[in-house]
């Protein structure tokens, strides 16, 4: 019984043909780009941009976005190769199972909880902040104890400051509602996704165009604030730390890689879909951050989970702010749905492999969804959304995702050596340069994140290792085929 035993590629391909039989190759390159843009634009841009500027990079947060995008591009090309080889649910977990063995697959699957589950919690917290802004406009004020976690200070755009509450109830509400919807099998159709993509892009462009004329250039001085003497607090190290924080804004591009089996021409469509969506979003992000830090001094965004609303309030278009907030809320809702659904898919796959209890792969008799998994994560995500500050959540999600990207890049190098002749409808170019560059950039961004993020990652992964050796290893179907 070996913890390094890999799942044969033939077995994975058989699973793909059985579980995803009937998928038609209908997605054009344009559709893949739209899919990527829809998955990428979300809470990271509308919530963490201000925090990255206030705590790390200042107005140079625009450079942080560019640095994060470069790391994503290298990792994205590696994702595309795996997606064309192994079009199976489970994302990086499945790729690791085929290349680095069961133990590393478990590590990456456990790590993906940080990306998907805590990602949904982060979006939930920011969603609640924008909801409060909307309610305040209509004179509706919720009790302070019920709109803020105990360990954060909430600043509303009207100047109201709330020094810690008891629980963030709106965040728990939206997470719970979406989890219950997923149990019923609710999912977005392609037409709804395309509509939401258009809405989100319009919101970003509207913010850029309308806010541009209200920019105060004095807010850009200094463009790169002097380092405080602490690594990651402004200066060039602050730009790197800012990139690690806003990295969250790019999470979702790997959704393009999961659509390889439905692409009309994966060899052409996958790189166009991944790189095209990254280029479009990076341009929009840089312009968005430039306008935002031009409207409001960067240090005023400290701890602000709804910086777009704060900045837009400085323009003369206050009558449009309600529409802006409603559109952002709609976009957030779709992102949370994707993240919660993605988390249930990963745990469902791990459970089918025997690494988690069968509880997580139980299918509802009527709705045909992994309903127990959805209920479990409804509670798990709600606890984080209700009680953990948004900046801490964002850092945890970023470091977890960066680790996943590192392992995927390593996986391409391993697969090229172990299975050089395996069929690939898309091949990562310039190997080994691209995966090695992806590994180095992602590790550098991880290094730039706060020490607390590393401590939480170590504790989380240590807990995962214990669960694997106590339960997963003994019940693995790969290592225990008779069970």
Image (tube, helix red, strand yellow):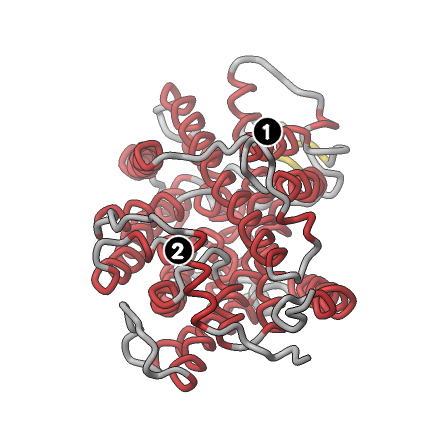
Vertical order, 356 against 133 (above or below): below
Which of the 4 image quarters holds residue 399? bottom right
Q: Residue at x 64, y 69 (%)?
A: 481
Vertical order, 82 against 162 (above or below): below
27 left or right of 14 in image: left
Packing grade of label 2 (10 A; few <14, some 14-19, many >=20) is many
Residue linked to disc 1: 177
Residue linked to disc 2: 258
Q: Residue at x 28, y 68 (%)?
A: 426
Point out residue 52 in the picture as x, y percentages from the top left corner: 51, 53
In this orientation, which residue lies closer to the viewer: 379 or 139? 379
14 left or right of 234 in image: left
The kind of secondary structure element at disc 2 is loop
In this orientation, which residue lies closer to the viewer: 141 or 116? 116
Check residue 449 in the rendering and tell me which mark sits there, or answer none: none
Q: Nearer the viewer, mark 2 or mark 1?
A: 2
The kind of secondary structure element at disc 1 is helix
Point out residue 5 in the picture as x, y percentages from the top left corner: 59, 78
In which quadrant of the rendered image does the N terminus lie? bottom right
Vertical order, 273 against 125 (above or below): below
In which quadrant of the rendered image does the C terminus lie? bottom right
- Give the CA separation, mark 2 to mark 1: 26 Å
Vertical order, 89 against 441 (above or below): above
Counting residues from the start of the chain, the first of labels 2 and 1 encountered is: 1
Packing grade of label 1 (10 A; few <14, some 14-19, many >=20) is few
Point out residue 254 in the picture as x, y percentages from the top left corner: 41, 57
Q: Residue at x 36, y 66 (%)?
A: 70
The answer to whether residue 67 is visible is no
């Amino acid at each position: 019984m070996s913890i390094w035993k890999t799942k044969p590629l033939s077995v994975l391909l058989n699973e793909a043909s059985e579980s995803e039989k009937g998928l038609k190759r209908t997605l054009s390159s344009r559709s893949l780009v739209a899919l990527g843009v829809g998955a990428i634009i979300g809470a990271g841009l509308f919530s963490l941009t201000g925090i990255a500027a206030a705590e790390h990079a200042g107005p140079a947060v625009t450079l942080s976005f560019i640095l994060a995008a470069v790391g994503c591009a290298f990792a994205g090309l590696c994702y595309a190769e795996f997606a064309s080889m192994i079009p199976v649910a489970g994302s990086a977990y499945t790729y690791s199972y085929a290349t680095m063995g069961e133990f590393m697959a478990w590590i990456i699957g456990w790590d993906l909880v940080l990306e998907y589950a805590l990602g949904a919690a982060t979006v939930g917290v920011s969603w609640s902040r924008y909801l409060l802004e909307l309610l305040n406009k209509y004179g509706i004020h919720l009790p302070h104890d019920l709109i803020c976690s105990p360990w954060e200070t909430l600043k509303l755009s009207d100047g109201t400051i709330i020094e810690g509450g008891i629980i963030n109830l709106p965040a728990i509400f939206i997470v719970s509602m979406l989890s219950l919807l997923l149990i019923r099998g609710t999912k977005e159709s392609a037409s709804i996704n395309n509509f939401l993509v258009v809405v989100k892009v319009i919101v970003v462009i509207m913010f850029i165009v309308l806010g541009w004329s209200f920019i105060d250039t004095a807010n850009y001085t200094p463009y790169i604030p002097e380092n405080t003497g602490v690594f990651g607090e402004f200066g060039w190290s602050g730009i790197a730390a800012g990139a690690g924080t806003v990295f969250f804004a790019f999470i979702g591009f790997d959704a393009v890689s999961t659509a390889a089996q439905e692409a009309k021409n994966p060899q052409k469509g996958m790189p166009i879909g991944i790189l095209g969506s990254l280029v479009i979003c990076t341009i929009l992000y840089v312009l968005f951050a430039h306008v935002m830090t031009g409207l409001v001094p960067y240090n005023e965004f400290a701890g602000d989970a709804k910086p777009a609303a704060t900045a837009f309030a400085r323009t003369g278009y206050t009558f449009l702010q309600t529409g802006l907030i409603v559109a952002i809320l709609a976009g957030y809702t779709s992102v949370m749905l994707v993240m919660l659904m993605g988390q249930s898919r990963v745990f469902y796959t791990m459970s089918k492999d025997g690494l988690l209890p069968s509880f997580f792969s139980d299918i509802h008799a009527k709705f045909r969804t992994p309903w127990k998994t959805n209920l479990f994560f409804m509670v798990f995500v709600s606890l984080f959304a209700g009680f953990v500050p948004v900046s801490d959540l964002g850092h945890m999600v970023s470091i977890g995702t960066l680790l996943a990207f590192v392992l995927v890049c390593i996986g391409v190098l391993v697969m090229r050596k172990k299975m050089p002749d395996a069929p690939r409808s898309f091949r990562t170019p310039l190997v080994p340069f691209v995966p090695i560059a992806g590994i180095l950039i992602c590790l550098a961004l991880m290094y730039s994140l706060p020490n607390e993020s590393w401590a939480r990652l170590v504790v989380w992964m240590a807990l995962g290792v214990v669960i694997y050796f106590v339960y997963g290893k003994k019940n693995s179907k790969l290592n225990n085929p008779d069970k």
